[in-house]
Image (spheres, coloured by chain):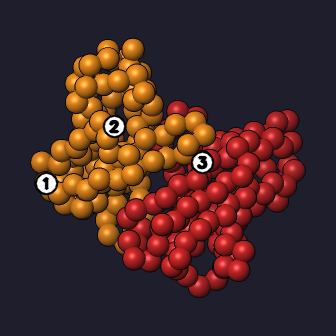
Chain colours: A red, B orange
Amino acid sequence: AQSVTQLDSQVPVFEEAPVELRCNYSSSVSVYLFWYVQYPNQGLQLLLKYLSGSTLVESINGFEAEFNKSQTSFHLRKPSVHISDTAEYFCAVSDHGTGFQKLVFGTGTRLLVSP
Amino acid sequence: DVKVTQSSRYLVKRTGEKVFLECVQDMDHENMFWYRQDPGLGLRLIYFSYDVKMKEKGDIPEGYSVSREKKERFSLILESASTNQTSMYLCASTTTGNTIYFGEGSWLTVV
């Protein structure tokens, strides 16, 4: 069975500062990895995903995540955050057997960006 | 754009009532899901469906049932609502091998 650990429930940061949201996973098989973002009172939106190939994946709004197989991690980073990045971020995993169809989510990290 | 619509955004129901949460997607997706989201617990899968009239239990199916009579519609049913089912419910859909898309969520309060 897979599991996802997001150790930080909340990360406060000042605007324009860098941020890292941590995600570690556990699985006995090869996995696909995802980061979803949830803005207040909305559903989840896909931020970025790792399927295969380059271990560094990027989103259109400046976030990036690196798949590290040896450390079973998929940390999310942004070099300079904006107020509008305030949201809850969820890391998720699915194994190659089920494809993208069954996701196991972490408990989420709330990113709070202040001026 | 893919659209997953949850028609009821905010509901307040009494203990013991039967509750229906409706979800409709407009992209002809085969797969649909119901998740429950609680603070500190993340998202937990209640039920999912790979095809019309097909359903499978997720991680926390107790107290819930589902119905998929048409491909575009996936309903979550609380047969007898209880206060511990107060939560946010998220519907999602996908076609095989693709990204999962979520609705905006239904906030259910059971009093």
Q: Residues within 10 Å of mark 2 (few under 14, many from 20)?
A: many
Residue tagged 2: B6
Q: The residue under label 2 is which amino acid type? A: Gln
Q: Residues within 10 Å of mark 3 (few under 14, many from 20)?
A: many
- Residue A13 point in image, percent of width and height: 83, 43
Q: Chain of mark 2?
A: B
Query: How far apart, in angstroms, are the residues tagged by discs 1 and 2?
Result: 20 Å
User: Element type at marker 2?
Assistant: strand
Disc number at residue A111?
none
Disc number at residue A107?
3
Q: Nearer the viewer, mark 3 or mark 2?
A: 3
Q: Does B79 sit left or right of A21 as displayed?
A: left
Q: Is residue B103 above or below residue A104?
A: above
Q: Nearer the viewer, mark 1 or mark 2?
A: 1
Residue tagged 1: B53
User: Element type at marker 3?
Assistant: loop
- Residue B92 point in image, percent of width and height: 37, 50
Residue A50 in view: yes
Q: Nearer the viewer, residue B55 or A47?
A: B55
Q: Residue at x 69, y 69 (%)?
A: A73
Q: Is residue A95 above or below residue A24?
A: below
Q: Chain of mark 1?
A: B
User: Element type at marker 1?
Assistant: loop
Q: Nearer the viewer, mark 1 or mark 3?
A: 3
Q: Does A15 sit left or right of A31 as displayed?
A: right
